[in-house]
């Protein structure tokens, strides 16, 4: 599979967000919704909800043990779903993985 240039990736994510990725409560605060693998933003970053199901043939950068839990883009916590700065307003599975994964604390 051909890798996506960073500009294309960011543009795709921006389009997905503009399409209404979050809901609003009556008080006006954003309610973060779970990211589904079938969505454009998820496909753009190669998001898989369960890292154990990553297809290594199409995601050669994946290494066993990598997950959203240890990614620098994902909120620290203990919740099974957490916010991710790559997809603002959305929640990713802590046990998930994407092609943009970066070890928390690495430079």
Image: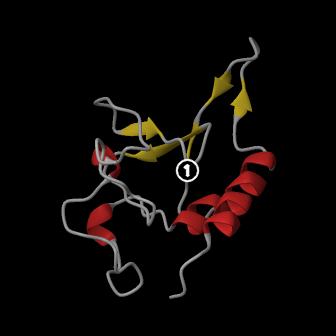
Residue at image location 32% in from the left, 81% down from the top: 56
Query: Relative to 28, is 15 above or below?
Result: below
Point out residue 40 in the picture as x, y percentages from the top left corner. Answer: 67, 64
> For this rendering, which residue is in front, 9 or 96?
9
Residue 38, image x and y in percent?
Answer: 59, 66
Residue reaching furthest to the top: 27
The image shows residue 10 at horizontal and vertical percentages of 67, 58
Residue drawn at (53%, 41%) of the image? 85
User: In terms of depth relative to the viewer, which is nearer, 36 or 76?
Assistant: 76
Residue visible at 48% across and 62% down in the picture: 47
- Which of 53/7 is in front? 7
Q: In screen coordinates, is 11 left or right of 49?
A: right
- Residue 30: percent from left, percent from top: 67, 25
Q: How is the image coloured?
A: secondary structure
Q: Which residue in the protein does label 1 denote?
A: 35
- Disc 1 residue crowd, few under 14, some 14–19, many 20+, Cα 10 Å: many
Looking at the rendering, which quadrant does residue 99 occupy? bottom left
| Residue 21 placement: quadrant | top right
Which residue, as the protein is rendered here, is positioned at the far front? 107
Farthest-out residue, left? 65
Q: How many marks?
A: 1
Q: Secondary structure at mark 1?
A: loop
77 is higher (above) or lower (below) than 52: above
Instruction: Please give the name of the residue rendered at 28% of the width and 41% of the height, measured from the top-left corner.
Output: 105
Figure check: 16 above or below 34: below
């Amino acid at each position: 599979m051909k890798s996506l240039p960073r500009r294309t990736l960011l543009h795709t994510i921006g389009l997905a967000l503009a399409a209404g990725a979050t809901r609003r409560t009556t008080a006006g605060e954003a309610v973060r919704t779970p990211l589904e693998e079938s969505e454009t933003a998820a496909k753009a970053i190669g998001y898989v909800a369960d890292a154990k199901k990553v297809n290594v043939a199409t995601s050669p950068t994946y290494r066993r043990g990598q997950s959203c839990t240890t990614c620098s883009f994902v909120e620290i916590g203990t919740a099974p779903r957490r916010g991710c700065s790559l997809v603002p307003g959305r929640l990713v599975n802590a046990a998930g993985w994407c092609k943009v994964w970066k070890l928390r604390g690495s430079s």
